[in-house]
Amino acid sequence: MRRLPLFVLMAAGIAGCPMPINRPDVTQPDVAVQDRVATDTNRPDIVSMPDAMSMPDATSMPDATSMPDAMSLPDVMSLPDGATGASAQIRAVQMAAAGMVDLPIEGVLVTYVVPAIAGATAGNDPAGFAVQADPTGPALFIAVDPATLMPAPTAGDRVSFRVTTTRAVNGGASRWASAISGYNRMSGSNPLAPMVQDLSSAADIASALGSYEYELVRLTGSITDNGANAGAAFRSFAITTAGIPTMDANLRMRIPQALATTLGLAAGCRVTLGPTPMWRFTAQAQPSAWVAADIMASGCPAIMDAGPEGGVDAAVDARADTGVIVDSGVDTGVRVDSGVITDSGVPTDTGVPMGDACVPRIVINE
């Protein structure tokens, strides 16, 4: 056997074995290296969600952006049992954002037509009409002048239309339909008696106002003050009822000033209002009358005819404590309390006869 030189064998061994390669340490880098790499490549750690990437508390709905009380309409969120589809349509309008919408209202009853009141602010007290589908609501006020519709709506009409614009009122707590289209009267002279709610014994008129707003109601109560201004051309009076026997600042009867003057309304009057829509001003319930047919008053101080012999100049606007109007044939604004006044202008004691009769004293504010 031929022997090969040693250097040949060594060369062959070197050729058959791979040369060692100098490798870096292939062990996993420590966490700090991984974090650095992730940071350098702007790639978040995808294994575990870091604190900065988890949903922070600030992205949950904060109190400031949650629906405020005035906008959340807590009292009108649920429909009464047995409510019709039309009631659901009314509720959709009530819950819509103010502005342009396109919402149907189908087959509702016109329960009351609100007239324009001379001297009133049109934006606050517009002519319009209320609609309702079920006896316990909900109801909606349509702030569209009835005279602009054909045929003009009247109480008892069954109508359909589309609400195209809503307006937020009462601090955002309510919606009016301020523009409509496709108005159609389906029928007329439908009975409204089944729709009327008598709230004389209700204890929650103010506390659950959202459940009553613009619904057709009747109410009997007693006036407990001499009234206050309640917007241009309107006056309001504190009232108590069987259900609310003590004065509540959030329950006041509202009526046009001219009608209140004609009726001589004042503390002590017993009144029955309605059926009319339950009006409201923010959180204040305002059972209302717009025309004489909406209200019956009794127990008020009697309206008297002083006549020319009463010694009152018809041009003098005078008032006294009781709020009773003295009618001298013209609208003098004279009001009387107890006692008499002579032609000389000197008041005498109550009950002193003038001629054959005793008359109340007429007090004139200088």
Image: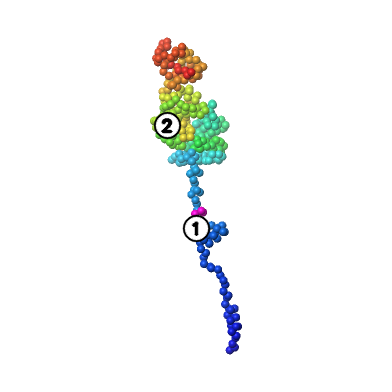
- Tell me if 275 is positioned left or right of 123 in this view: left
Question: Given the image, on which type of amino acid does mark 1 rest?
Answer: Ser
| 266 falls in the magenta region | no
Residue 188, above or below 25: above
- Which residue is the site of mark 1? 48
Give percent across and percent down for residue 143. Answer: 53, 33
Return the residue nearer the eye: 234 or 112.
Answer: 234
Residue name at image x 43 percent, y 30 percent: 219
Give percent across and percent down for residue 91. Answer: 49, 40
Whether residue 258 is visible, yes or no, is yes
What secondary structure characterizes most of the magenta part? loop
Say which quarter of the image contains residue 203.
top left
Residue name at image x 48 percent, y 22 percent: 262
> Which quarter of the image is occupied by the N terminus?
bottom right
Q: Secondary structure at mark 2?
A: loop
Give percent across and percent down for residue 326. Answer: 46, 18
Return the residue nearer the eye: 273 or 366.
Answer: 366
| 51 falls in the magenta region | yes
Whether residue 294 is visible, yes or no, is no
Q: Which residues are magenta?
A: 49-53
Q: Secondary structure at mark 1?
A: loop
- Which residue is the site of mark 2? 248
Give percent across and percent down for residue 302. Answer: 43, 20
Residue name at image x 52 percent, y 41 percent: 96
